[in-house]
Image (cartoon, rainbow, N blue to C red):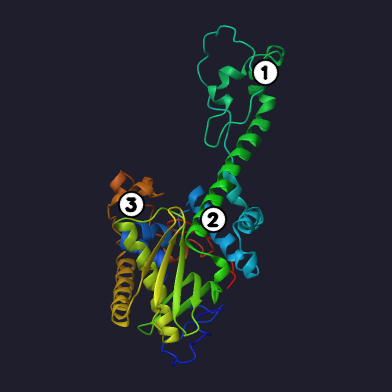
């Protein structure tokens, strides 16, 4: 259900209808993530939106996507069944569905067990018999990380030494599978920890969300399309709106806090313009720290925010015309995936795409601070 088609019974329709699903918008558009990118660093915006450079999502981002999916599915259950055990049982099937949508995510847990070739090591004294090797914990190096020197012995010697046998070439597929399974298990356990944080701050048995993973969009200033996905929208019997956003990273400080509130104000503006109602509460649920951050906007603030978005869009259009996207160094540079192309790190940006050679606008993984947005339609 989209904001364009759902209006508060007491609200008058607002000007600036957004295009419906499947319709193309010829003018400028902004999502919270891309708007925040330009504010953070114009060059990052260019890399992601114009050059469309690929980014490998981090395990934390993928875990965030998984937890979002579990929480969405949790509210499909009858209220009395929305328990911690039920949420835990949803983790594995939700992960399987994510892999169906984006099989490449499985590569996050693959790792080459055999390390690069190393100089031959001097013969070591005989070691006492060792117990059968067990899988290394997530992130730990496997036995074969000693390099090719440890793999050059004949099969006869390896057969008499359980450690050498485990490092033998024919054993590598098994080691890889075991290590990958351990990393996946740790990943899924981390999702369980975040779900425990959710239940520490909310009781879903007492909630009936009006919408989940809902696409909201509208036009502002007659041409700028703003849109995004709201994790959850609660509506009280009196018609008050509460926008809820799940955050799977730690509670923000300084620059991160402003980025999170920017996203929620974005959603609040769309809801106000499409429903004529200013949300009563913008709520951030920080699952890792089991914290709640509530913010209450007003109409005057959202009007100022709307002017900010229009000015931001105009700045983006000027940068496109001038092909001038400059880096903006900050503490966030340490998390950037494109340092090799950034002048601040001694890199050179790729040639600016010409219209006839611009990267094809195919769906890509959109990254957020703590999650990714998978291509294709989403439930709403």
Residue at 63% across / 55% down in the picture?
Answer: 85
Q: Nearer the viewer, residue 138 or 322?
A: 138
Q: Residues within 10 Å of mark 1 (few under 14, many from 20)?
A: some
Could you tell me residue 242's position as x and y percent? 44, 75
**Quarter that holds the C terminus:** bottom right
* Left or right of 7 in this view: 224: left
- The vertical placement of 9 against 353, above or below, is below
Res 323 → quadrant? bottom left
> Marks 2/3: CA distance?
27 Å
Residue 288 visible in the shown view: yes
Residue for badge 1: 162
- Count the numbered circles shown: 3
- The vertical placement of 301 against 244, above or below, is below
Residue for badge 2: 195
Residue 358 visible in the shown view: no
- The vertical placement of 9 against 32, above or below, is below
Q: Nearer the viewer, mark 2 or mark 1?
A: 2
Residue for badge 3: 332
**Quarter that holds the N terminus:** bottom right
């Amino acid at each position: 259900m989209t904001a364009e088609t759902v209006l508060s019974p007491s609200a008058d329709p607002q000007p600036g209808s957004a295009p419906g699903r499947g319709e193309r918008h010829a003018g400028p558009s902004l999502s919270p993530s891309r708007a925040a990118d330009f504010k953070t660093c114009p060059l990052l915006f260019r890399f992601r939106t114009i050059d469309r450079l690929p980014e490998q999502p981090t395990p934390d981002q993928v875990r965030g996507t998984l937890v979002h999916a579990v929480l969405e599915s949790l509210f499909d259950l009858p209220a009395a069944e929305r328990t911690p055990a039920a949420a835990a049982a949803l983790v594995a099937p939700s992960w399987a569905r994510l892999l169906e949508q984006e099989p490449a995510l499985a590569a996050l847990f693959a790792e080459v067990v055999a390390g690069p070739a190393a100089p031959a090591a001097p013969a070591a004294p005989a070691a006492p018999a060792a117990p059968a090797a067990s899988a290394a914990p997530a992130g730990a190096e496997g036995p074969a990380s000693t390099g090719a020197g440890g793999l050059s012995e004949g099969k006869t010697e390896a057969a008499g030494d359980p450690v050498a046998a485990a490092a033998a070439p024919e054993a590598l597929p098994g080691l890889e599978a075991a290590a990958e399974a351990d990393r996946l298990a740790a990943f899924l356990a981390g999702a369980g920890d975040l779900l425990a944080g959710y239940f520490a701050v909310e009781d879903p048995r007492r909630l009936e969300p009006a919408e989940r993973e809902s696409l909201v969009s509208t036009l502002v200033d007659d041409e700028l399309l703003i849109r995004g996905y709201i994790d959850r929208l609660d509506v009280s019997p009196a018609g008050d709106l509460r926008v809820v956003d799940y955050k799977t990273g730690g509670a923000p400080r300084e620059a991160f806090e402003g980025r999170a509130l920017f996203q929620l104000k974005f959603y609040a503006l769309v809801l106000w313009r499409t429903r004529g109602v200013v949300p009563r509460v913008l709520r951030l649920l920080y699952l890792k720290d089991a914290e709640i951050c509530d913010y209450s906007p007003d109409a005057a603030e959202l009007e100022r925010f709307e002017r900010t978005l229009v000015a931001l869009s105009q700045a983006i259009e000027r940068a496109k015309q001038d092909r001038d996207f400059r880096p903006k160094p900050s503490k966030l540079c340490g998390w950037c995936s494109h340092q090799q192309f950034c002048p601040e790190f001694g890199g050179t940006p790729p040639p600016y795409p010409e219209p006839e050679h611009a990267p094809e606008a195919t769906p890509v993984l959109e990254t957020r601070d703590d999650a990714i947005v998978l291509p294709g339609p989403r439930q709403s």
